[in-house]
Image (tube, grey):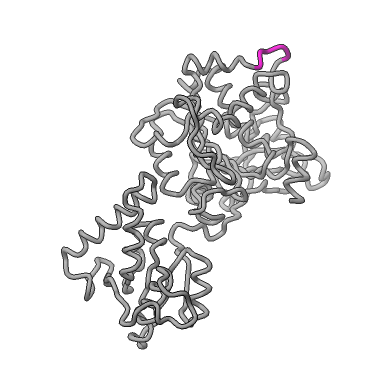
Amino acid sequence: MKKNYVLDANVLLHDPHAIFRFEDNDVIIPIYAIEEIDQFKREGSERGRNARTIARLLDEVRGAGTLATGVLLESGGTLRIAIPERRPELLVGLESGSQDNAILQTAIDIRDRHKDRPTIFVTMDTNLRIRADALGIPAETYENQRVHDPAIEQSVVEIEVPGAEVDAFFQNGSLSVANVADLLPNSAVLLRDAGAPSHTALGRFDAARGQIVALRVGREGVMGVRPRNKEQAFALDLLLDDSVRLITLIGKAGTGKTLLALAAALKRTTEDNAYSRLLVSRPIMPLGRDLGFLPGDVDEKLNPWMQPIFDNLEFLFSNGGTRPGRDARGFVELLESGQIQVEPLTYIRGRSLPHQYLIVDEAQNLTPHEVKTIITRCGEGTKIVLTGDPQQIDNPYVDHASNGLLVVAERFRRERIAGHVVLAKGERSELAELAANLL
């Protein structure tokens, strides 16, 4: 049975092409949603771009008919803009003059006018879904860009094998096992001796060879940073493997996401010369109330935002991270020479980044569209690492299931050039680990 889908403004601001995502059902946009979208068209943000995009799309669609009665879409459904027969302020029990109530009134009128088919209200506003349900209108969130299983934890897979095979794995560096079809490419594997459970070996599934291969990270670690648990060892192995071009590192605060990525990137860039430059970036997203405009030139304005990156670089170049006696401010020379660049994501659109090691920190604050823009900047020979914690989202327009970091991890999980690691154990300090768990 065909359905009527009434779309809220936030759905179109999130994905302007949502009008084409409802198959052969009828899509209805309240006129009040168009008015709300019009308020954002002058913004230079992604929300402003989306507001202008939906206006252009609607203008193109109306060339095939009139939006008042409905325009036939290629999917077989129709698209129209609706105005309620009654004034929004007549909605009993709710505040008059509210844009949300006007949109809800439109949905109620459509439901009452079309009793022969279901009417569903689609909004990404949780409170508005609750109000719609209270008024007897079925309400759903927009699912097209959401991850249905937001955990997507690719934890270490344990495989029981005879003890002789564990020994052979240590000797040969690889092992063929049965039922590898269930393993995702580049997933972490723990081989456990069936006779002696403490006799184990850690490896990674190489989908091209169809084998479990040994990790190549030595006990000395990378740039003086040694892996403290099996997830960190697995992450370092992926970070150093040039055949894996995209990596998503997910973990709570203090698990070493940024530090491990920077350590591997410094080794491959400054010591091995495998990449021409290390580019580290993060979105400009404040925690709590914004401080407003900052004084100084561009570098001085960005310094507070990029300080977490500088803290990690200073640690790697100090006794805490690398060889004793190294200058903690030694990374400044690399910054001045351009071999390391630290900059915001604001100016990345339109760039081409070949043969670079790109780290995007705090990627959980990015929308799927922003992440797509970043990844499509990667040229030949570039490796990109996305790090973040989905539990620490400061962007009000994404949530745990719709942020760019988890969407990328979900969409790339079966690709041979991509790897996904979930770091579970905090290693920053005992206090930081307790805070992450208890608070």
Q: Above or below — where is 112 with respect to 217?
A: below
Q: Is residue 324 left or right of residue 421?
A: right
**Magenta segment, principal secondary structure?**
loop
Provide the residue span drawn in magenta. Answer: 324-328
Foreground: 240 or 223? 223
Q: Where's residue 300, x and y in %?
A: 50, 25
Residue 370, given in percent of the width and then of the height, sits at: 42, 45
Q: Point out residue 272 in the picture as x, y percentages from the top left corner.
A: 54, 18
Q: Please, is residue 325 above or below residue 180 in the view? A: above
Residue 207 in view? no
Question: Which image quarter: residue 239?
Answer: top right
Closest to the observer: 193 or 401? 401
Q: Give the residue displayed 71% in from the left and 34% down from the top.
A: 168
Between 122 and 128, which is closer to the camera in this rendering?
A: 128
Residue name at image x 62 percent, y 42 percent: 176
**Quarter holding the N terminus?**
bottom left
> Is residue 245 placed above or below 370 in the rendered structure?
above
Q: Nearer the viewer, residue 358 or 79?
A: 79
Q: Quadrant of residue 8?
A: bottom left
Give the quadrant of residue 435.
top right
Horizontal side of 309 relative to 429 (left or right) equals left
Res. 276 visible in picture:
yes
